[in-house]
Amino acid sequence: MTANPTACLLIIGNEVLSGRTRDANLQFLATRLGEIGIPLREARVIPDVEDTIIATVNECRARFTHVFTTGGIGPTHDDITSECVAKAFGVPWEVHAETRAIMAADYARRDPPVEFNAARLRMATLPRGAVPIRCSETTAPGFSMENVHVMAGVPRIMRSMFEALAPQLAGGQPIRSHTVHADYVYEGQIAEGLAAIQARHPALDLGSYPYYRGKGGGVALVAKGTDGAAVEAAAAECLALLARFGAAREGEPAPEG
Amino acid sequence: MTANPTACLLIIGNEVLSGRTRDANLQFLATRLGEIGIPLREARVIPDVEDTIIATVNECRARFTHVFTTGGIGPTHDDITSECVAKAFGVPWEVHAETRAIMAADYARRDPPVEFNAARLRMATLPRGAVPIRCSETTAPGFSMENVHVMAGVPRIMRSMFEALAPQLAGGQPIRSHTVHADYVYEGQIAEGLAAIQARHPALDLGSYPYYRGKGGGVALVAKGTDGAAVEAAAAECLALLARFGAAREGEPAPEG
């Protein structure tokens, strides 16, 4: 797993830090990045503040194979991600002629036609050298600048941009995962046995997650890693461990309710 | 707003970075911290990796007035937050006698009694000098170590720990917020006018958030800051701006559906 490329996600937006908006992008990207073998190793939520965005982009693009950003690429004054990425790379932020033409044709085709004003032109303005990420949801693009991939914050548009980008990313080995669980079994009972399983499978991540269901609850154990056979072996050991204390079952516990 | 104390949240757990678990703590803490005048300025999701936790805690406790952590204080091998905070502060990690006595009494009182084994004793082991955060949900405590406040990852327990801690935090001025919205009005139309309102109220944060509802949608504008009169004035200007393009309304748009 250590040989896999790594990913960092920057969620850019005051609205997440103020509690107004509940982020809906982290879980999607975490799951998809695991599937294509570029595991997410860190995520940060940062405000729409120029110095913070520039410093964070520069720190993270040096530390991770890929940096993905969401948010801040619309037409309003608080949409400053694109300009900040240009400053982080030390390149001009300039109108991208091909993108302007695509957006102009789109706006002219609308009924009634949409005015291609200065605010909307910001969405056709990219760091010099950026490669647009075009998707079916909007003609205002995301873009890749070297290993930094800038996407919209609106989940529907972000997902479309990510799926357009994903085939071009050199992935590693997909992360395999196997979950088992048992009701009325508690972490304090199985901690010692679980640590022994982890010690036998040092290349895997074994996680223990309590859950609560009305007056009961239990624990779910998750084995993860790139070696599918090792994941299956560890999951079988976890199932046997749970069976010593209760009714062990395959898979995730049923949702609450 | 610049005079207010600041907060950073560290969400510690592989399960959030793998997509297994959707974080449920960020939005709660963001909202509550704004209410008590300690605005959240950054959040990070980091893995259960010792070096990463230690380095992140040390970086963030120097940069922010308060650092809150969630996750990694249970009894299993992947619960390493408490040990890592001890290492970050360079102090021993040792059994906290008062906490051990409280937990022992709790476990003895259960029917059937719960074994106070080595795994559970980890939850009574704290950095030297830490002040326990006791709550009504569990006798296994969180703790404060100087400006670092370590809480459980389970939302119900985290909330209880936060509410126990909050009265002891020296807050600043609460963040006031006023939202207006209009259906069928789009960001590209109001961007210029909104920038002018922002320029007239530099101490406020004005945010613009598109929303989508079936075949329609619109935009919500949010004014935030510690000066309630300025927030009301800016919100009135936003309402007037939206009214130039559509049916402007008070408050958040209705939920989708």
Image (spheres, coloured by chain):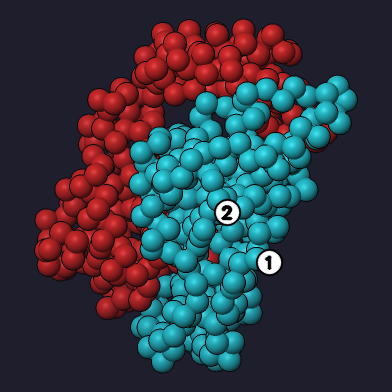
Chain colours: A cyan, B red
Q: Which mark is residue A144?
A: 2
Q: Is residue B87 left or right of residue A232?
A: left
| Residue receiving disc 1 | A167
Rendered position, A113 above or below A228? above
Image location (x, y in percent) of residue A186: 45, 72
Name the spot of residue A234 as percent of width and height, x first.
Answer: 51, 88
Residue placed most toward the observer, B56 or B87: B56
Q: Nearer the viewer, residue A18 or B100?
A: A18
Chain of the residue displaying label 1: A
Q: Quadrant of residue B205?
A: top left
Q: CA distance from mark 2 to mark 1?
A: 13 Å
Residue B20 in the image: x percent, y percent?
56, 64
Q: Nearer the viewer, residue A184 or A187?
A: A187
Quadrant (top left, top right, bottom left, bottom right) of the C terminus of chain A: bottom right
Query: Helix, strand, or loop for circle 1?
Result: helix
Q: Is residue B247 visible?
A: yes
Q: Decide if residue B59 is on the left or right side of residue A127.
A: left
Q: Chain of mark 2?
A: A
User: Mark 1 packing: few (<14 Cα in 10 Å), some, or many (20+)?
Assistant: few
User: Which residue is at 46% across, 74% downward?
Assistant: A207
| Proximity of marks 2 and 1: CB atoms separated by less than 8 Å | no
